[in-house]
Image (tube, rainbow, N blue to C red):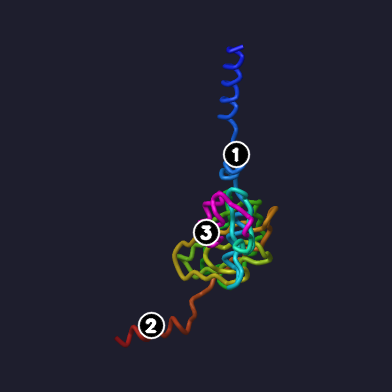
């Protein structure tokens, strides 16, 4: 009987070692709720907040209103944590290189991000001013601080913008529009004139 009790104890111990909790599993996987909460809180108005609980993998609007909504970790405001906390899946995104042949013309690409996905859009403005617009969606997170429909302009250099799927569930389809632009002629002439005066 003692041998049976010993085997049963060892089996229980071994089973306990291989079992993982729900929270441990979710930490290693991309969280759509976490990404959603981050974007919603960053874009919320003065009187509204969105908070995320890692333990529950849940986003709650105005969590301070819910006294009986415990979270072992704590409710974290969406704008207070880094994107990496959500463990997003890094996906390849389109890139754009601006030059004189692309001035005034737009290259439109319909792109999709899976649930829990993010990507880095590379914009090369070394040979000319480059612009990008993200549009035709409501739930795209843009880490640069820009909003949907904004014209984001880069005067020079190689630049990167991190975007992510901030929909509560499912994939997200959106439009990326790239264009090149010439420096305004009036500003360039004024700069040259000013330089010759000195």
Indicate which label's residue lies in the foreground, 3 or 1: 1
* The residue stretch that appears in magenta: 67-87
Label 3: state its secondary structure.
strand
Task: Give the residue number, with chain letter if any, for mark 2.
Answer: 192
Label 2: state its secondary structure.
helix
Q: Is residue 180 above or below residue 4?
A: below
Q: Which mark is residue 78?
A: none
Percent coordinates x, y for residue 8 in the rendering: 61, 19
Tell me whether the residue at label 1 lies in contact with that at label 2, contact meaning CB atoms closer than 8 angstroms.
Answer: no
Task: Give the residue number, with chain letter if any, for mark 1.
Answer: 21
Tell me whether the residue at label 2 lies in contact with that at label 3, contact meaning CB atoms closer than 8 angstroms.
Answer: no
Q: Which numbered disc flags the more N-terminal residue, 3 or 1?
A: 1
Q: Is residue 68 magenta?
A: yes
Residue at 48%, 76% in the rendered image: 183
Task: Give the residue number, with chain letter if any, for mark 3.
Answer: 122
Which of the 4 quarters of the picture holds residue 198? bottom left
Percent coordinates x, y for residue 93 in the rendering: 58, 55
Label 1: state its secondary structure.
loop
């Amino acid at each position: 009987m003692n041998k049976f009790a010993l085997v049963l104890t060892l089996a229980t111990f071994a089973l306990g070692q291989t079992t993982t909790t729900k929270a441990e599993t979710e930490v290693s996987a991309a969280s759509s709720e976490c990404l959603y909460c981050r974007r919603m809180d960053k874009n919320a108005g003065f009187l509204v907040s969105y908070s995320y609980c890692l333990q529950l993998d849940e986003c709650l609007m105005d969590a301070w209103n819910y006294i009986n909504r415990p979270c072992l970790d704590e409710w974290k405001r969406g704008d207070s944590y880094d994107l990496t906390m959500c463990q997003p899946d890094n996906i390849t995104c389109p890139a754009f290189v601006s030059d004189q042949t692309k001035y005034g013309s737009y290259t439109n690409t319909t792109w999709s991000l899976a649930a829990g996905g993010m990507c880095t859009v590379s914009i090369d403005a070394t040979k000319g001013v480059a612009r990008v617009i993200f549009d035709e969606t409501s739930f795209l997170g843009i880490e640069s601080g820009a909003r949907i429909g904004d014209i984001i302009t880069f005067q020079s250099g190689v630049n990167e913008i991190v975007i992510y799927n901030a929909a509560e569930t499912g994939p997200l389809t959106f439009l990326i529009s790239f264009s090149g632009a010439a420096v305004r002629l009036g500003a360039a002439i004024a700069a040259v004139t000013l330089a010759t005066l000195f």
